[in-house]
Structures are given as structure tokens and as C-alpha cells.
Image: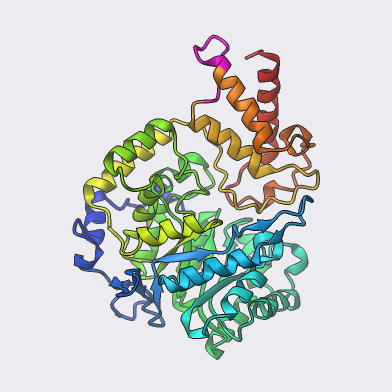
Amino acid sequence: MNDMKHKDISRRDFLKTAGAAGLAAAGLTACGNGSGASSAETEADPAGQMTFRTSPTTGDRVSLLGFGMMRLPNLPSGQEGNDEIDQETVNRMVDYAIAHGVNYFDTSPAYCQGLSERATGIALKRHPRESFYVATKLSNFNPGTWSREASIEMYRNSMKELQVDYIDYLLLHAVGQGGMQALHDRYLDNGILEFLLEERDAGRIRNLGFSYHGDVKVFDWLLSRHDHYRWDFVQIQLNYLDWRFSKAINPRNTNAEYLYGELAKRNIPAIIMEPLLGGRLANVPDNIFTMLKEREPENSVASWAFRFAGSFPGVLTVLSGMTRMEHLQENVRTYSPLDALTETEFNFLQDVASLMMQFDSIPCNDCKYCMPCPYGIDIPGVLLHYNRCLNEGNIPASSQSENYRKARRAFLVGYDRSVPRLRQASHCIGCNQCSPHCPQGIDIPKELHRIDAFVEKLKQGKL
């Protein structure tokens, strides 16, 4: 079902649900599986002032900020694919998060080249089990893991790595990629989804849901079966750019406005991923940076995106993949407590999103699903450097432009500093092992070849 055929959530509807005076003053609707429980109630932790939402399914009191364990800090080994997670720093960040009210930690067997679950388990084991909720995913992307036995083994290994005997939030990972056929291969025909329902009945899974990327027909089909599956939550990509422009950025995507609206109609709580679009909404073009800072000089550009994602009452938690302590500290401040958007601010961010659509950036979210590259290319590094230079005005379009020399030098010098030469786009042979893993559907070899050709023209002064 095409998302463009459905009625949009209007700005007035947003005001009704989010409220100019904040969520605490708004009349919040039920959120969940139709139980009638008061949903997503906003509470303040008297110690740290973290905003919490209450799950209507289990009554879990969940921090509005969730810790995404996807971009954990590394101790570089110097060899591609062999980086070791900096466990000491992870432990410190988890300690700080829990001390300041964060209690939702999201991981996957696929994160950090397979090391995230173990690092998460080590860090969380040092805290009482009742002090946190841990979420992980059945990330059976590889056909070798599609059998019932292999998928069950992955699920049980997650418990082992996390050092838990139950999982609070278990997700079918990235449904929609590969369409309905992939859903059948990974979860339906092998009986795994029915197995997970039995595990939920047994209490080894407390909440069962899915994360969505790709074909909206899969999303719609799974929601049409809500009476049978009783989804406890659904994880979607939502931010002020994807709210109305996700499909314009990439035709295979679905606007977040539609996804959130479909969940709200069924009272299913939403968990939000990519509130910053892999950092793109924290590193916006200079003119947009100025606009945001003029409105809120004391707050960061990123805080606007987090406030947007958190202002919807049906949102249970907003995930942020935080690599450094300062990222965590800033995000904690943003949600301690949440200053919900007013209607005027919501409209302002929609205007900002329209302006951002004028920039032809590559929709890379730095998830690193494309890594490691068999030829050693730092794929996210290359794409993000291009986006950063685009945002900063350092993409020289023509040698006739006034700032050509300055922009040319800034791009080339920055490229060599950001990405070692042996890991640059020139080494791409087009094997396409990366693109099938990209949740954003980027044609990665095409973009790498385009950037490499652009770099060569800059070096030769032929633009």
C-alpha cells in the first residue's frame, strides 16, 4: 500500500497530540494493543529529571532517551574489521546513562561487527537486572541463518552474550528489506515468528516487535495481522526530514508521517531510530545551522531533532547511537525533561526540512551495515566526507566559481585526512557486496564511483 495514498497527519493534529504546553498538559491517547491503558504518560525522574513513557503492554516505565549500542567506541587495531570495543569507556557511559535515568539499551548481533551484544552484556551485568531494559534483534540476514535451527541458535546466543535469561524487547530485524519474500524466508516459512510468540508466552521475551526498512507492503501486512501477533511495539525511522521527505529522498522509503500514523491508529507504541539521520541533522548546512542557532542560541542543533522525535505521544523511546560521553550527556540534558515542540516550532522544522531538500546529499546514516568492505574501502567515511563538504559549501561546482580554489583544497585535503588513501573510493571494483545490506537502499558502488570521478576532476582542475 503506497504511503502517499493515505491522509497526512496535519500540523493541527500534531498540536492536538503534542501540545504547545508540552506532553504533560496534552490529552494523551491510548497507545499499545487496544488495552485502554493510559499510554506514553510523561513523568519526571525527581533525581535526574529524565522524561519517561509508560508502556501500555507491560507497564514498563521507559526512559525517553534510549541508548543505541550500534556506534560503540573502539580501540583501533590498525586492521580493517579487527577493531576492539573500548569496554572501559562503554562501561563508564552505561554507568552514567543509568545514573541519569536512561534504562533502555538497544543492540543486535549485527552491530559493531558482531561485538555489540557482548559489550552490552558486560556493561549491564554490573547493574541490577531490574534497573534496565535490554532490546536485541533476530538479525538473520544471511541465508545461512534462515533455517529454524540457525535462527533459534542466534536467538539463544543473544541471551548468552547479553548474560540474561529473558529479553525485554525482541525485534524482527529490518523487515521490509527484500520485500515479502524475505519476510517469508526469514520469519514465516521456517516457523520462527510462531516460535517467538511461544517464547513471549513463556516469559523469555517480554515485548515482541519489529524494526522496519524498505517495502511498505511488508509493514502494512504485519500491521494487518496485529490481532494475531499483538505487536508490543514497532521501531521506525522518524525525524524532521523523513517526516514528509523520506520518499522524496529515496522512492523505496516511506514517509515517517505515514508509519507513525498507522501505529497510532492501532495504539502500538513506536520506538524511534535515526532521529539524527546518522548525524546529518547534527551537521546541517551552514545556512540552516544559523537558522537553528538564532532560534535557540543555547541549545545544540542536534537537540532540535531529538525534541522533534520525542514530542509525539505515541513514542516510547528515542534511540541514539552514542560514541562519546559528551553525546550522551547532551542527549540526557535534552530529555531531562523534554521540552516538547510547540506548533510554531513544528512548522519551523518543516520549513527547515524543505530547505535541506535543496542539498543533494547521500542518505548515509553511518550504520556500517555495509562494512567491512572486502577491498578495505571506508564506505561510510567516504560518503560522510562528501556530505560534510556539501553542507559546508566545499563542493566546487565549477572552476568559474569565486571560491573554487578554496573549496577544491578544502575537499581534497579533508578527504585525505578523513579517509586514508588506501581506503578511498578509487579502490571500489563494483563487487556490490555492500548495497544489499544498506537499510537506506543506497547504490553504494554507483556513489563511490561518482565521488571518485569527482575527486579526479578536482585533482586535475577539470571542473
Instruction: Give yes or no for residue 397 being in the magenta stretch.
Output: yes
Q: Which residues are magenta?
A: 394-405
Whether 382 is drawn above or below 73: the answer is above
In this orientation, does residue 344 appear?
A: yes
Q: Say which residue appears at 66% left-offset and 62% top-offset.
A: 86
Whether 364 is drawn above or below 395: the answer is below
Task: Indicate the quadrant where residue 408 lies.
Answer: top right
353 horizontally vs 369: left or right: left
Q: Say which residue appears at 52% left-offset and 57% top-offset.
A: 217
In this orientation, does residue 170 appear?
A: no
Tell which residue pokes out farthest to the top in this image.
Answer: 400
Whether 332 is drawn above or below 373: the answer is below
Image x and y of residue 226, in percent: 45, 73
Q: Nearer the viewer, residue 21 or 83?
A: 83
Image x and y of residue 304, in percent: 35, 49
Task: Indicate the quadrant where residue 171 lies.
Answer: bottom right
Image x and y of residue 88, in percent: 63, 67
Task: Indicate the quadrant where residue 397 lies.
Answer: top right
229 horizontally vs 335: left or right: right
Q: Say which residue appears at 58% left-offset and 15% top-offset.
A: 405
445 horizontally vs 286: left or right: right
Image x and y of residue 332, in percent: 40, 62
What secondary structure prevails in the magenta region?
A: loop
Instruction: Give yes or no for residue 400 being in the magenta stretch.
Output: yes
